[in-house]
Image: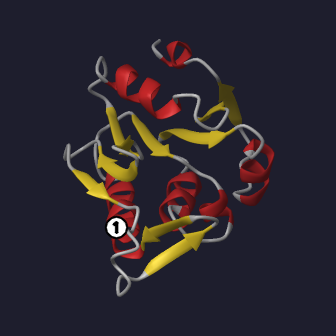
């Protein structure tokens, strides 16, 4: 089952996911928290954080640009690996925070999200901001999904 967790930009979706995961041992994948104003990747499986937002002082780093943001291609490659490795684990739910404009342009988490959606053998919790749900469902050809606005709906 694909669950799409949605809400407005800046509404605390990642923070709510972090709280929800405290009571779960069957979750893997990645989160994208903002720490001290900088976006990071958090590997649920390893517990490690990686700075994904590239600083202006890193002009030689390969980056993905979208609007005002610069993201490290190297860190996204690592995050995609982490998500794909989730398919080999025994976790129940693979979390991908978040699917948005980068993925709709074929970058970011595009490759790993495509693989886990196409595998069809694992529950997925994809974070998608309000206003992009229809675009994501169409782009990834998701046939069966449920919209979640409250993570308590998943505790059963």
**In the rendered image, the vertical position of residue 74 relative to residue 48, given as above or below:** below
**In the rendered image, the vertical position of residue 29 relative to residue 69, given as above or below:** above
Q: Is residue 152 left or right of residue 55?
A: right
Q: x, y (%) of residue 61?
A: 35, 82
- Of the 4 image quadrants, the one containing the N terminus is top right
Tally of numbered tags: 1
- Among the 4 quarters of the image, the one containing residue 31: top left
**In the rendered image, the vertical position of residue 103 relative to residue 38, given as above or below:** below
Query: Residue at (41%, 73%) from the top-left corner?
Result: 56
Nearest to the observer: residue 85 or residue 9: 9
- Binning the other alpha carbons within 10 Å of mark 1 as few (below 14), some (14 to 19) or many (20 upward) gives some
Scheme by which the image is coloured:
secondary structure
- Among the 4 quarters of the image, the one containing residue 82: bottom left
Determine the residue located farthest toward the bottom in the rendered image.
60
Identify the secondary structure beneath mark 1. Answer: helix
Nearest to the observer: residue 87 or residue 135: 135
Q: Is residue 146 left or right of residue 50?
A: right
Q: x, y (%) of residue 134?
A: 80, 45
Query: Residue at (45%, 24%) from the top-left corner?
Result: 16
Query: Residue at (45%, 68%) from the top-left corner?
Result: 71
Query: Residue at (55%, 41%) from the top-left corner?
Result: 126
Nearest to the observer: residue 61 or residue 47: 61
- Which residue position is annotated with label 1? 75
Q: x, y (%) of residue 140?
A: 69, 57
- Among the 4 quarters of the image, the one containing residue 145: top right
Determine the residue located farthest toward the front in the rendered image.
57
């Amino acid at each position: 089952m694909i669950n799409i967790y949605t809400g407005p930009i800046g509404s605390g979706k990642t923070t709510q996911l972090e709280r929800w995961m405290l009571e779960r041992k069957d979750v893997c994948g990645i989160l994208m928290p903002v720490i001290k104003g900088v976006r990071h990747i958090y590997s649920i499986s390893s517990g490690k954080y990686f700075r994904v937002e590239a600083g202006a002082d890193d002009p030689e780093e390969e980056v993905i640009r979208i609007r005002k943001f610069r993201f490290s291609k190297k860190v996204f490659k690592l995050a995609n690996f982490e998500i794909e490795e989730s398919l080999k684990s025994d976790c129940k739910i693979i979390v991908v925070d978040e699917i948005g404009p980068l993925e709709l342009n074929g970058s970011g988490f595009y490759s790993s999200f495509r693989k886990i959606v196409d595998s069809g053998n694992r529950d997925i919790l994809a974070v998608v901001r309000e206003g992009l749900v229809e675009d994501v469902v169409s782009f990834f050809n998701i046939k069966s999904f449920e919209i979640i606005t409250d993570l308590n709906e998943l505790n059963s």
